[in-house]
Amino acid sequence: MWGGRFAGGPAAVMRAINASIAVDKRLWREDIAASRAHAAMLGAQGILSGEDAAAIGRGLAKVADEIGAGKLVEDPALEDIHMHVEHRLTELIGPAAGRLHTARSRNDQVATDFKLWVRGAIDEALAGIDALEDVLLVRADEHADTVMPGFTHLQSGQPVTLGHHLLAYREMLVRDKSRFADARKRMNECPLGSAALAGTGFPVDRTATARALGFERPNANSIDAVSDRDFAIDYLHAAALTALHLSRLAEEIVLWASQPFGFVRLPDAWSTGSSIMPNKRNPDAAELVRGHSARIVGDLVALLILLKGLPLAYAKDLQDDKPPLFDAHDLLGLSLAAMAGMIADLDFVPERMRAAAAAGHATATDLADWLARVADVPFREAHNIAGRAVVAAEQAGKPLDGLSLAQLQAIDGRITKHALSCLSVEASVASRTSAGGTAPARVREAIAAARAARSDR
Ligand code: ARG
């Protein structure tokens, strides 16, 4: 299709390094949609005759049917999906097909196709995140009162509710959705009509093609339009951060499912066995979500480095923009689905969580708070008194709330029997009623607000 000025054909390795069809065939729907919009516009503008434009439109519909039915014949000599579609169109409708490439280049074509694809990938990511968010809300609601240890430094810090802990992930996902939505809004400008890089002398209607393809408007600058891949980087950044959030949650599932924690039992559907150790139930799906996040972050880095140092406008390096996107999309889709499935099916073990929350004297802060609030002790001094109470509990081999009033009063006379009632893990979580706090009442409010926000969308 570009052989006019060449006498010899490409070397076999040249052909091999140049061909992208094995990868970019995934863009066939977008390629045909963009070509149909382009052909219709050429017809409407009188750049092509009505008959030619109509024949091209019908022919492209036929090509779409064929490829949809799995009948794409891959030929590395035809390089990429754009040439494959045009080649098949030529076989189907003859010389009129040669007019489709009027006023365009593969440079604006591929930028348009890829943008359409990324836009679809964003919509899929948003739906996948919504589904996981819904599952988190269901499980958080079930466990609004379930007490578990809250950790800092992976040391028991203060008791929290499982519902509250799960809702922390929901907040991450909400930010992820806003990043995807933001990327979608920013990217929605159509490159078509930018041609190779300089625009075209044909009287094209760029607004018409932009509208036909669901874009807000045409790109303002033809050089930028064919060389910009910011939209793909925006997608990968949002995907990488989402994957990172899933990885943190996956890591918690791996920990919680381990015998020393025992906070969850992994159902059969989400476990694998060991070929040597008959006792094993391994959390492979969670581990793979954790592992996949590394690849998605790598995809982002690959594209950042691909673009760094590229002079304007198009260069063939840009053909390598697709593998990282396709890889990240596939891995993110699987990861979101696996997390939603796993979280929905996890058997939480509240007794283990409660026992762990009660260990480690996790209500020491509550004793200090009580001294500061009720007995008007400066907090620094209250902290010291509660610290001595922890030592006394350790020496007595008891939890903090197992000390008698006499034992506590021996440490500080201002401690009264009312202080005892705030030392249980249930009293501790119930007291954390500040906005955004872990008290079951606040968790229920947060769930109601989250559900209202979901149904608003
Ligand atoms: N297969 C190419 C890509 O993905 C299409 C654009 C080719 N443009 C060119 N000037 N060779 O980037």
Image (spheres, rainbow, N blue to C red):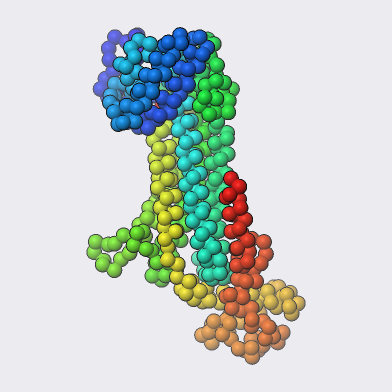
Q: Is residue 316 above or below residue 176?
A: above
Q: Is residue 287 above or below residue 102?
A: below
Residue 385 x %, y %: 66, 80
Residue for point 64% across, 91% down: 406
Residue 40 x %, y %: 48, 17
Q: Is residue 383 above or below residue 247?
A: below
User: In this image, 267 relative to 214: left or right?
Assistant: left
**Quadrant assignment for the N terminus:** top left
**Quadrant assignment for the C terminus:** top right
Residue for point 55% across, 52% down: 172
In the rendered image, the residue lying farthest to the right is 376
Residue for point 57% across, 81% down: 400
Viewer-side residue, 41 vs 346: 41
User: In this image, 248 relative to 175: left or right?
Assistant: left
Residue 208, by quadrant, is: top right
In the rendered image, the residue lying farthest to the left is 276
Residue 450 x %, y %: 59, 54
Viewer-side residue, 316 vs 249: 249
Viewer-side residue, 41 vs 81: 41
Residue 52 in view of the camera: yes
Q: Is residue 2 above or below residue 237?
A: above
Residue 302 x %, y %: 43, 37
Q: How many marks?
A: 0
Viewer-side residue, 170 vs 293: 170
Residue 323, by quadrant, is: top left
Residue 311 in view of the camera: no
Residue for point 53% across, 76% down: 358
User: In this image, 69 relative to 247: left or right?
Assistant: left
Residue 407, by quadrant, is: bottom right
Q: Quadrant of ligand 1?
A: top left
